[in-house]
Amino acid sequence: MADSLVHEIFTDFDQSKVKIEGISLEGDGTTCYALLFDLKSSKSGEIDEFLLGNVGDKAEHSIRLTRDKAWWLFPTPNLDLPANTDTQFILLKLASSKYKYAALLTITVPAYMGTLRGKDGRIVARFERDSGTGGQGKIVVCMGNDLMGVVRGAADGMREVRGWGNSLLDAVVEGVERMMGNGGQGTIFSDTLTYCTWNSLFPVPRTAASVLKTLTSLKSFRIHPATLLIDDAWQSINDESGGPYTRLRSLTSFEAWDKFMDGIKGGLKEFVTRVKEDYGVERVGVWHTISGYWQGVEPVAFREKYKLVKVTLGDYPGPWEGAGFQYYIPHPDSVHQFFADYYRFLSACGVSFTKCDNVASLDALVSAREVRWEKGEGVLGAAVDMPTLRRNARQAVKDAAEKYFGGSEEGRVIWCMEMSPRIYLGKEVGGSTGARMVCRNSDDYFPDIMDSHRYHIYANVLNGIFTSQMNVVPDLDMFQSHAYIPEGEDVQKFSTEGTSAQAEYHAALRALANGPVTLTDVAGHTDPTVLDKLLGKSSKSGRSVALQAKKAFFVGPSVFEDLLSEKTGMGLKVYSEGEYGGGVLGVWNVRSKEGTAEDKLTFADILLLTSPSPERTTYAVHSFKTSKVYLADKAVSSIIPCEAPIQLEPFGFDIFTIASFVTSERCTIACLGLTDKYNPLSALTGPAVFLDNSPVLFGATFKCVGCASFVVKRLAGAGAGEEGAGKIKVVVGQTPVEETLIQRRVDERIGEIVTVDFRGLLRADPGEGDVYEMVLEVL
């Protein structure tokens, strides 16, 4: 059967050099099998290639994830695979198969890196040797009628295939399956705000004083980050003269750069202590690269204690230094001691996590030579095994974080510029602890390039549906709550007022994701009207609460539409399950130039977020953009009064909240959460229910203050004629809410929409169990 299914994908599949074996996946409704290729390579760097064939008209639509730069995957809606860069994952909408969708995922193991490339319009499987000899290269193919089921099936199939005949990997696979089954998607950043220094320091001096100024500015808006990430510019480096991307910039010390400290005494430790004590920051992290700094380490500073190697860049696209560029990094025999010493220093300074950047640059290196020093001059010695160099560098960072931060997962290391299959499909896949790595999920956020914003959203979503099936929590990168301020502008005079369109565009997507929520504002330019929709306040002085999803988002069939065109068409739909039922659906206009998105919310969209709850048949639906409310009735498969129209200009988005009704003998009520937030349901701390078997008392508990919305439908004749019939009373904690703060409007087709504004009840200081319990009494 598997043999015939391959021909439903490729028009000219060459079966002479491949074995096909089925993969058993329990109860997911997909068909999964592995293509097995006998490898001949025996030396590191050797390549085995196998022609798969041409998809042609077998697929109506396709999406591929290709590493167009050494560090990043770029989603592209076609099958024009490049011949010089690696494609990792292909998703197909099939034209004439009993299955609607298919996915192809190449396998990477310690012995080889598996990828796909293009050749004369055909797809070629490529396996680059890392260790050992012979063996089998493997590709997982998954087919099915549920799109996300096929994506998950490919990832599960990969884990199953990697475990074949390997007891150690079997244990890893079991650990991952437990983790995935338990929804272990939390990180040290969950539900909190992080301030990252990167873009915030571009138009101002890149100094510690500028960081403190931004923290002071945020504090003035009662925005309290739990985390500070000190990005590039803090390290001590030599910065020799030269062109902007060719000058040699290498690490000279573990201590903070005097230029960054700018007169603040006591080094990194004093600065970390100050931000924690003065601004209530709970954790501080710092940035470094996998090699110390962008061009490694300065030999004079480190050669006495650590062995070094001189490495040479190849020609894989991405690195700005160019093919043939050389620099020094720690030797594979010394790299563990180097990072152990580095992280011991950082831990002693109060640092508790790192952002490890430029990780996949190790893939772009073509050679490494040992170096010995004679009269201060470096003399090249023996060649160093490149797979060992790559493997030891990554493992050294992990081991150092385990020892000094208590772990390397859940964000204690944020892996950045890491989108090589050797990282998230290689030895690290799964992890044995049941926790996930936090990994950057796309190329950078570029606030200065207007046309980059739409693709940044698109790339994070398309990459995210793949990476979130790995042992990864996707990090969507930082954003600013204000418009871009060009470098060199007078920050005090430059106005960003009324320019929050691109800020909201990014902020809203962070609310539907479960990775770090990271802000990089310039001091004095924060737009609180944007952040108030993403963040919550449980008290005036307590840390800000990031109102975000608990699980990774997903997509539906419309993702195959021509979403990036400049013509008018559909929007990018992103689905996120609510922790206590229902969910939110975000729609973004990612069309190029001035393209407009015209779409609609359909009953099929509702089903994607409510099908796991067959006992619920009726749902309230709320539009963030228009504040309109709709009724979705699964009993008659319709939306009342009509399918919700969606029209989005450039930088436009809308978010629909979908919440189920709960019924008593007197009324039925749907809690829409805090509808002044991008993700209203994320503010709930538990399911909204009728209290103490009362038919009239309905309770919901929130993490923070806001505007809570409900749809109330009284059952025919229930309570009619009773004293006070028709009234609604609201209490938060022990405090009755004034009627002037309760907005009520009736729609005969939907019910009564009730919105309670309890922002005025914000407590002064945080306390234990810092929640807001709201009770509606429906008379």
Image (cartoon, grey):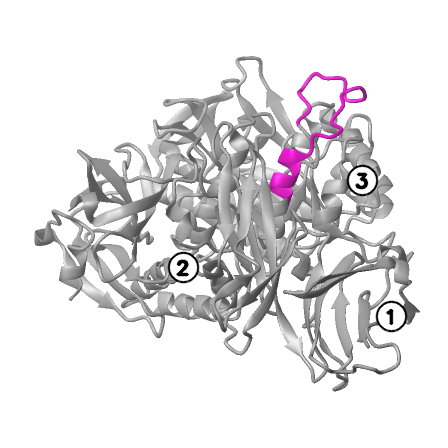
- Residues in magenta? 484-507
Locate residue 27, reporting x and y percent. 35, 74
Asked if residue 719 can be seen in this view, the reply is yes
The amino acid type of the residue labelled 2 equals Met
Q: Is 492 contained in the magenta span?
A: yes
Q: On screen, 190 above or below 383?
A: below
Q: Residue at x 40, y 43 (%)?
A: 420
755 sits left or right of 309 in the view: right
Q: Nearer the viewer, residue 25 or 553?
A: 553
The amino acid type of the residue labelled 1 equals Gly
Of the image marks 3 and 1, the number of the one nearer the N terminus = 3
- The secondary element bearing badge 2 is classed as helix
Q: Are marks 2 and 3 in contact (CB under 8 Å)?
A: no
Q: Nearer the viewer, residue 766 or 760?
A: 760
Q: Residue furthest bottom?
A: 693
Q: Is 43 contained in the magenta span?
A: no
Locate residue 192, reporting x and y percent. 70, 53
- Name the quadrant of the C terminus: bottom right
Q: Nearer the viewer, mark 3 or mark 1?
A: 1
Q: Residue furthest left?
A: 16
Asked if residue 266 can be seen in this view, the reply is no
Q: Residue under label 1, please give it.
A: 733
Q: On screen, 386 above or below 740?
A: above
Q: Residue under label 2, please give it.
A: 148
**Main SS of residues in magenta:** loop
Of the image marks 2 and 1, the number of the one nearer the N terminus = 2
Q: Residue under label 3, please give it.
A: 218
3D distance between C-alphas at marks 2 and 1: 41 Å
The amino acid type of the residue labelled 3 equals Leu
Q: Nearer the viewer, residue 416 or 299?
A: 416
Residue 665: image quadrant is bottom right
